[in-house]
Amino acid sequence: MLNAIRNLAVFVTALATAVPAFAAGEVNLYSYRQESLLKPLTDAFTAETGIKVNVVHAEKGLTEKIIAAGDNNPADLVLTVDVGRLEEVRAAGLFEPVESEVISEVVPAHLRHPENLWFALTTRARVIYAHQDVAEDALTSIRDLADPKWKGRICTRSGKHVYNIGLIASIIAEDGEEAAEQWLRGLKANLARKPQGNDRAQAKAIFEGQCDLAIANRYYMGKMHYNSKSPEQQQWAEQIRVVYLDQEIGGRGQHINISGAGLLNTAKNRDNAIKLLEFLLGETAQGLYASANFEEPVREGIATDSYIESLGSFKADRINLQEVAEHRAAAARLVDRVGFDL
Ligand SMILES: [Fe+2]
């Protein structure tokens, strides 16, 4: 009899650990992130916790959607790239602070909102792609992009794209608007062609000999290098050397942006949402970010992909991204003022 009870207890315990979904519930998230990237992360979370993750993928208009839904908004979390997009949701008053020891421990202060209204999950370095024939010391600072010696040799996507707005905003934050304007005019004068295409299109342009330098996010090097569907992209990557800027002692460091998240103040599954956030900062998820999307984990000590590792390491700019985000509107005006895209 005693044995039977013992066996039953073992069985019940096994059941509880095998199918925690019974009581685990769900968490709903709005995401600008690609489904192919997010799915392995949310699957791993569900496997570990039993909590179901429902995802609404959005291209744009997320803030408007959340505002329009009001209290009926089903989402608990927003997950997106670029501090600008997180700031947009925060400025609309839609985030609430997250109290979490994991977050405070794992995410450095400059990579989160001062009141934990949003925080980074990964960083994304916006580097220079240089043709391998460009001398190694030819370019060391973001300021050098305005040097007339690069006339007709630089390619970039639109100045209005969030990635470039973030970069220009960081220069306004650190050097002031006047210096930033001078710099942007100098860079425009050095462009090989009208700003166009995405970051990978700039790698292609280097490959085709249209330019020697391009402004692009580093993770695309991984995406091109491992792109078995488009072998030509592997070639584009092969002739590029990644240049990290402002690395000298006392220098500002390489400009980065983030992918990150925030907890909506209408969240109905608050506890599960915080569990998911903490999971995304854990070793498993951080490793997935590094190996599947080639971004830099915010958690220290995570192994990076071997190819990305071969591109070298860098010192990142430690300016608080909240401060950078505050200059985004000025950056957009500056792009117009200098006619950067014309
Ligand atoms: Fe991207």
Image (cartoon, helix red, strand yellow):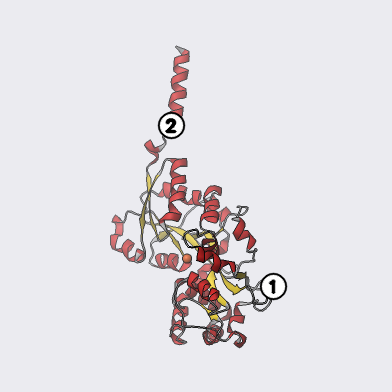
Residue 64 visible within the image: yes
Q: Amino acid at mark 2?
A: Ala
- Which residue is label 2 attached to? 16
Residue 113 visible within the image: no
Residue 158 in the image: state x and y as whole percent.
45, 77
Along the viewing direction, whichever of 57 and 79 lies nearer the viewer:
57
Q: Is mark 1 within 8 Å of ligand 1?
A: no
How many C-alpha atoms fall within 10 Å of the one at disc 1: few (<14), some, or many (≥20)?
Answer: few
Say what secondary structure mark 2 lies in: helix
Q: Residue at x 57, y 86 (%)?
A: 151
* Figure quadrant of residue 317: bottom right
Along the viewing direction, whichever of 238 and 278 lies nearer the viewer:
238
Residue 77 in the image: state x and y as whole percent.
40, 55
- Which residue is label 1 attached to? 248
Residue 326 in the image: state x and y as whole percent.
48, 73
Drawn side of residue 42 relative to residue 68, left or right: right
Q: Residue at x 68, y 74 (%)?
A: 136
